[in-house]
Image: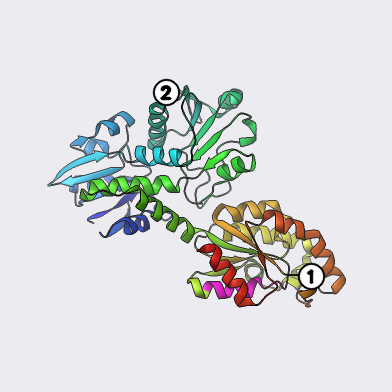
Amino acid sequence: MEYGCIGEKLGHSFSKEIHNALTDYNYELKEIAKENVDAFMRERDFKAINVTIPYKETVIPYLDSVSDEAKKIGAVNTIVNKNGVLYGYNTDFYGMKSLIERAEIELENKTVAILGGGGTSKTAYAVAESSGAKAIYKVSRSSKDGFITYDELYNISDSIDIIINTTPVGMYPNIYASAVEIEKFKNLSGVVDAVYNPLRSKLVFDASENNIKAVGGLYMLVAQAAAAVEKFIDTEVKTEKIERVFKGLFNNKENIVLIGMPASGKTTIGTELSAILNRPFYDSDRLIEETENCTIPEIFKNKGEAYFRECEADAIFTLSKNNSSVISTGGGAVLNKKNIELLKENGKIFFLDRPLEMLVTTNDRPLSSNRADLEKRYNERYELYKTYADVLLDASGSIEDVVNQILKVLE
């Protein structure tokens, strides 16, 4: 390996895509078990690498030189091999500082709570300290080495202005989890989550729902990667390129989620988008039928609507973990708010607003198999569709017209 990233688990990593977008060397992802780190570092068979969880502190004893900033933080995420001499740096500092500044979250004279005790936590502490934070609390599951517990944090929750999460809670594949209950913090002005997959963690989503400025960690990942590239090959990466790579990656990773009434064209339009954009297409109803090995009308007949909704929630939980996909949902998916919250973690939601008079009834839709039932469902759900959608589309035209509307939004 010449250039790459080492870590214990890298299946969720975006680093290869980011480095490939920033420069032209071959960048590899290399998963290393804990017992094999020693041999890898002693061999020094690489030109330059990034280091991620859980080895940012483990690699330090193998280095010949460590930058002052990395020494202060106590963690290294970038190593450059110059003729057999290993130099360690911490570009996470630049990445996190850039993320916070881009989000316009002010740390000066604020009380900051940093969740987690790993290398990224130390980076967050250094950023908060350098930004003039009034007070900084380090939070962990046990109160030792200067940390407070989560229960102790809740006891002082009214004094906390900013939360920075550096734990992996809520990260793929264990989405829809949050390290703290955001509702307990009454005076928050900002939330920063180092988690970047999903694009919007539950912590970020919950904060946004409470009108708190919140940002996920993807921009940090791109900015720190740019700083690493500068160390790797002694070059300069301009801010404009960082922004362009970030936006391109975010848009490419974000799912296209289609909601709307039965017969509004979700499956047909989703299939068309999948072909045009070269993205996989998933239909939650189809996934339910495959999982249950029977049709949806059969599920309703034999087990009832409540059971079907449980199956639907399970299917959406599974599909929400995807990136770069087109997802079509059942007409009643909006009845469960958790479904929407999950879909928004990695997706942009498009409501296909097809007029009631253009919707048709079919026997394979148990709750709208006749005109009266269809109108009832439409009236029950229409405001939910509008409320939960990021984009409302006029779906009264042709399939091509609706597809072009979506493509225009994506552009």
- Name the residue carrying label 2: 145
The residue that appears at 79% across and 77% down in the rendered structure is 363
Disc nearer the start of the sequence (1/2): 2
Q: Residue 266 appears in which quarter of the rendering?
A: bottom right
Residue 200 appears in the figure: yes
Q: Position of residue 253 (x, y in %)?
A: 48, 59
Q: Amino acid under label 2? A: Asp
- Name the residue carrying label 1: 356
Of the two numbered discs 1 and 2 in the rendering, the one whose residue sits closer to the viewer: 1
Q: How many marks do you count on the picture?
A: 2
Membership of 229 in magenta stretch: no
Q: Position of residue 163 (x, y in %)?
A: 52, 33
Q: Dot 2: what SS?
A: loop
CA gap between label 1 and label 2 equals 63 Å
The residue that appears at 24% across and 34% down in the rendered structure is 67
Residue range in magenta is 263-274
- Residue 332 shown left or right of residue 60 in the figure: right
Image disc number at residue 117: none
Quarter holding the N terminus is: bottom left
